Amino acid sequence: MTAAAIEFERVTKTYRKRLGGQEIPALTEVSFSVAPGRVCAFLGPNGAGKTTSISILMGFLYADWGKIRVLGCDPGDVKAKRRIGFVPENFSFYKHLNAEKLMRFHARLAEVAEEATSGLIRDLLAKVRLSGYEKLKIGRYSRGMVQRLGIAQSLIGDPELLVLDEPTSGLDPSGRKEVRDLLLALKNAGKTIFLSSHLLSEVEQLSDEAVIIDRGRVVRAGAMKDLLETGNQVEVVATEINEELATVLRELGAKVERSSQGVRIIVGSERKRELVERLWLQGSDVVRLNPVKGTLEDLYMKLVGKNDAA
């Protein structure tokens, strides 16, 4: 059995204020795992414990209790760090450097062969649309350009695992699409991606699974397709339907929508067999029958939306 790329088992962390000795629980028995080659969305409102979890994962903080393994190593182990690319939510680079010099610095840290460095830097900067800006000082970069440079430097060592905290922050819609396309390419290349973002529609497109955390506890986790499965309604698309049957279906609580492509019917799962038989009897072909799925945003708002608004 393949070991998990990331494993949290009953991880607990409490912050203690020096004055008054007040204790503030940040994480309480947080457990989840991410298999190699998967894209996992790590979601939750502000203050839910996401940054604390990522800091523990990266070895910046220590947990008070629990087991954490990253690529088979303890957090902070150099053997694991060599195989991780990291983009924090808030970061800054040396403003007096340009992109090429910064990337060369990180290439040396990642022990990239000198003869391969120039070509690698050129390719990575092209991927994040920074070609032509290699010699411009980073202090003159826009927020979005700095963000793209951060993504490029995270890839310099060809990491197995990418830990990305709001990787599209500061980017315009076209920039977000380019980053999304890049992450999809990395996913197809077999990279493991642990992604924290508030852009739920983009996360839904990218992710194989999700972990939703609130008030330091995991409130839902699993494969994305299972999380979004409503389980009580089906969508039936048929070539045609007569008005008599449409009226009967509406009286039964079904939703009937006509378009140039056919008729879309949403009905309770318990009536799908009856509906299909009625359609066949009237001579209509059933083009598609699928469970109705919700959206990640709907699930998120149901679980933690009130806390996020607060």
Image (tube, helix red, strand yellow):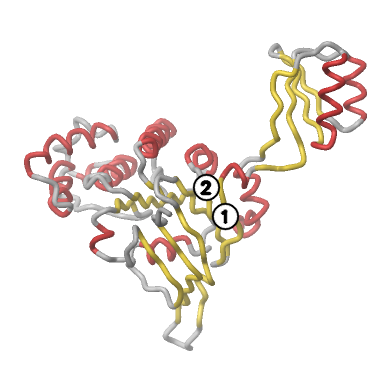
- Reply above or below: 272 against 170: above
Instruction: State if disc 1 and disc 2 touch (CB < 8 Å).
Output: yes
Residue at 52% over, 47% down: 209
Mark 1 Cα-neighbour bin, 10 Å: few <14, some 14–19, many ≥20: many
Query: To which quarter of the image does residue 216 belong?
Result: bottom right
Q: Amino acid at mark 2?
A: Glu
Mark closer to the chain start, 2 or 1: 2
Element carrying mark 2: strand
Query: To which quarter of the image does residue 28 belong?
Result: bottom right
Query: To which quarter of the image does residue 76 belong?
Result: bottom left
* Horizontal side of residue 89 vs 97, given as left or right: right
Q: Which residue is mark 2?
A: 209
Q: Amino acid at mark 1?
A: Ala
Q: Give the tally of numbered discs.
A: 2
- Look at the image and tell me in which quarter the C terminus lies: bottom right
Image coordinates of residue 2 in percent, x first then y, are: 40, 53
> Which residue in the rendered view is the most extreme toward the left?
115
Image coordinates of residue 60 in percent, x first then y, are: 33, 67
* Horizontal side of residue 83 vs 275, given as left or right: left
Inter-mark Cα distance, 2 to 1: 8 Å
- Look at the image and tell me in which quarter the N terminus lies: bottom left
- Reply above or below: 248 against 188: above
Residue at 43% over, 66% down: 52
Query: Residue 221 shows which numbered tag?
Result: 1
Element carrying mark 1: strand
Image coordinates of residue 19 in percent, x first then y, are: 44, 87
Residue at 32% over, 64% down: 73
- Reply above or below: 218 against 173: below
Residue at 41% over, 67% down: 68
| In front of the other: 203 or 157 | 157
Mark 2 Cα-neighbour bin, 10 Å: few <14, some 14–19, many ≥20: many
| In front of the other: 280 or 9 | 280
